[in-house]
Image: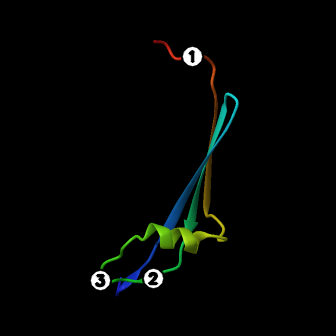
């Protein structure tokens, strides 16, 4: 869009285990619009991670589970 990258976001995923329980949290964090590089929008993960630090998430997804038995085999 006229040399500007819009709709940028960073997704952060965290996994926590405790005994037989597991919890996965996925956060979508909106980022500011940014100038394109000669008309191309590039994702720079390290820069986006740093830019996302301290920003609120716009979406939080949580999945939890518990081991109920051994896998057959």
Q: Secondary structure at mark 3?
A: loop
> Split into 4 quadrants, where in the image is the C terminus?
top left
Q: Who is closer to the viewer here, 19 or 5?
A: 19
Which of the two discs, 1 and 2, sits closer to the camera? 1
Determine which residue is flagged by label 3.
39
Residue 52 percent across, percent down from the top left: 58, 70
Q: Residue furthest right?
A: 18
Identify the mark nearer the N-term, 1 or 3.
3
Which of the two discs, 1 and 3, sits closer to the camera? 1
- Residue pictured at 33% horizontal, 83% vertical: 37
Q: In the image, is 55 to the left or to the right of 9?
A: right
Q: Who is closer to the viewer here, 56 or 15?
A: 15
Instruction: Work out whether 35 lies above or below 65.
Output: below
Determine which residue is flagged by label 1.
70
Label 3 environment density (alpha carbons within 10 Å; few <14, some 14–19, many ≥20): few
The answer for how far apart the CA atoms under marks 1 and 3 are is: 52 Å
Determine which residue is flagged by label 2.
34
- Residue pictured at 67% horizontal, 71% vertical: 54
Q: In the image, is 46 to the left or to the right of 27?
A: left
Q: How is the image coloured?
A: rainbow
Q: Are marks 2 and 3 in contact (CB under 8 Å)?
A: no
């Amino acid at each position: 869009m006229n040399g500007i990258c819009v709709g940028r976001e960073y997704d952060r995923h965290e996994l926590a285990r405790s005994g037989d329980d597991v919890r996965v949290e996925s956060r979508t964090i909106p980022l500011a619009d940014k100038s394109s590089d000669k008309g191309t929008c590039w994702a720079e993960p390290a820069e986006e991670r740093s830019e996302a630090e301290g920003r609120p998430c716009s979406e939080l997804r949580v999945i939890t589970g518990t081991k109920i038995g051994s896998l057959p085999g």
